[in-house]
Amino acid sequence: MISALAIALASCQKDPGMSHSSPVKQEVFGTMPDGREVKIFTLTNKNGLRARVTEYGAILVSMETPDKTGKLADITHGYDSLEGWLTNTHYLGATVGRFGNRIKDGRFTLDGKEYTLAKNNEPGGIPCHLHGGVKGFDKVLWSGKPTDSNGVEFTYVSKDGEEGYPGNLTVKVTYTLTEANELKWEAVATTDAPTIVNLVHHSYWNLSGDPTTSINDHVLTLKAPSFLPTDAGLIPTGEIAPVAGTPMDFTKPTVIGQRVEADFEALKFGGGYDHCWVLEKGDGLRPVAKLKDPETGRVMEISTDQPAIQFYGGNFLDGTVTGKAGVKYAKRSALCLETEGFPDAPNKPNFPSSVLKPGETYRHSMIHTFSAE
């Protein structure tokens, strides 16, 4: 008589892509230019939602959710193959670090010592440091393994001096797909020397499921009474300004394209929406944003434990990136909603600190909840 354990073991052996203790499917996605193997993981829940994540850049490769008729579609921008992701210049789907968003002049001072970082971005013709540098966390190979809770845990050790940052930083990022239609992105980091950290999830969303359409018809709500004005280089000035009476006010559901071309300095500098909103104060995880596509009825709600959210309207997409199914991603064909610490915080004493010291643990939780109405 064959035991239940023997049957279970035989079942696992039949599908080497399936973890013994996890429903997560694991496959080879391709190889890096240096020959290292890259894995991709598929998470599926009882409602048919499907997320695919890869070790390269700890990237969310795709996210399939149903519309109000039950039709599933991928609602993210990206690429069909690893080769495409290796050309990813817009941080599509990526885990961004060591410091997400911008740092003025690529410089900061910590404990009396000045550190110089790459200037890899030039908004308004003014160079700055963006998203961790030339080879940030979005362009490195992480180590991934399935979890017991329908998730994948990625780990990476950023060596002291990598991209100019001090300290050896040990990072763990976990994606989890729940039966409540939540995609959780959780980051934890520790260091052996004082450093700065602002890890960010950078997916591009178009809830229509049609990447050739504009997100200007999406309706956005942000629980954010203030935003951070910037200079022409998109670096925060240090001011925290109220959104009331401005095109930056999304405290009530608002069609994104309604005021995107308004004669307002912040929008002129950003070529549209590309700013950091200061969220309502609150302890721990809390709901902060809601995005809806009126046509398909798809809804994405975001919760976080961070003080701010960057809303980027895809202004710099210009049709030069060829993505999934050969689609050329046009201007404002997708948007980002990135929960985060404040941009340029290392150079702004009045902003919440981004410094991480030995013995401390950096934590960042972001939950996307999908539905249709």
Image (tube, rainbow, N blue to C red):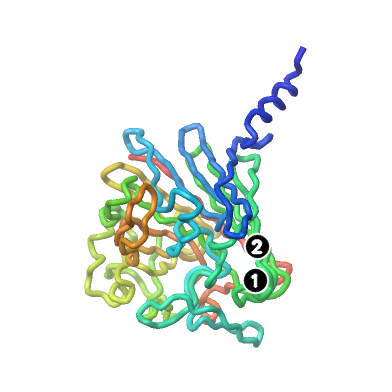
Identify the residue shown where x is 45% and y is 52%: 302
Which picture quadrant has residue 73? top left
Q: Residue 247 location, x and y as percent?
A: 27, 68
Say if residue 343 shows up in the picture. Answer: no
- The reply, left or right, for residue 233 in relation to residue 346 is left
Identify the residue shown where x is 62% and y is 40%: 149
Number of residue marks: 2
Q: Which mark is residue 121?
A: none
- Check disc 2 and report the residue beneath it: 189
Nearest the camera: 212 or 79? 79
Q: Residue 357 location, x and y as percent?
A: 69, 72
Does the residue at mark 1 contact the one at mark 2 (Cβ under 8 Å)? yes
Give the residue type that dot 2 points to. Answer: Ala
Nearest the camera: 155 or 363? 155
Q: Quadrant of the C terminus?
A: top left
Give the residue type that dot 1 points to. Answer: Leu
Disc 2: CA contacts within 10 A as few (<14), some (14-19) or many (>=20): many
Q: Secondary structure at mark 1?
A: strand
Q: Residue 90 location, x and y as percent?
A: 43, 63
Q: Residue 137 location, x and y as percent?
A: 57, 64
- Check disc 1 and report the residue beneath it: 356
Q: Secondary structure at mark 2?
A: strand
In this view, 273 is above or below 6: below
Identify the residue shown where x is 62% and y is 75%: 165
CA distance separating discs 1 and 2: 9 Å
- The reply, left or right, for residue 150 in relation to residue 124 is right
Q: Quadrant of the N terminus?
A: top right
- The reply, left or right, for residue 283 in relation to residue 218 is right
In this view, 316 is above or below 118: above
Say if residue 16 shows up in the picture. Answer: yes
